[in-house]
Amino acid sequence: MPAYRFAAVGVLNTAIDVAVFTVLHGQLGITLANLVSTSTGMAFSFTVNGIFVFDGARLGWRQAVRFVATTGTTMWLLQPVLIHLLLFAGPAPVAKLLATGLTVVVNFFAYRLLVWPRAHVESPS
């Protein structure tokens, strides 16, 4: 089931993202550290999700552009806003983890609908 594979890839991707963010946020601030950490995770995520979750035969430029646009929107725009809103829950790495959980759901549906949509099979008339 793609949702389980997506979750497994997401755990690895989140570990990469949060580790880079945790190391950099003190020096770069939340927004720039988030840009660097999510960009690092994006390279990993595109390849692994494309191959193991959504259909390994489709890792072309079309999917790459859609993936960057989709992930960029959720990770570079939505996630920093969520981190700032969630700082009441604890230090920045905790807020980052909470924000990541919310954006994971958005990304799964965006990837399924926009980046790697299911092939439509026409039924015989």
Image (cartoon, grey):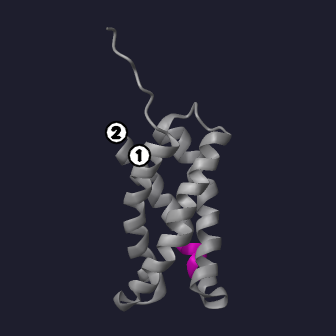
**Is 23 displayed left or right of 116 in the figure?**
right
Mark identifier at residue 5 = 1
> Secondary structure under badge 1?
helix
Vertical side of 3 occupied by 89: above or below = below
Q: Nearer the viewer, residue 21 or 73?
A: 73
Q: For the point 40% across and 85% down, which residue is it?
A: 85
The main secondary structure of the magenta stretch is helix
Q: Nearer the viewer, residue 22 or 69?
A: 69
Vertical side of 108 occupied by 112: above or below = above
- For label 2, the residue is 1
Where is the N terminus found, in terms of image quarters?
top left
Vertical side of 8 occupied by 101: above or below = below
Q: Quadrant of residue 94?
A: bottom left
> Secondary structure under badge 2?
loop
Q: For the point 45% across and 81% down, which residue is it?
A: 83
Numbered range of the magenta stretch:
18-22
User: Disc 1, disc 2: CB below 8 Å?
Assistant: yes
Q: Position of residue 78 (x, y in %)?
A: 47, 71
Q: Marks 1/2: CA distance?
A: 7 Å
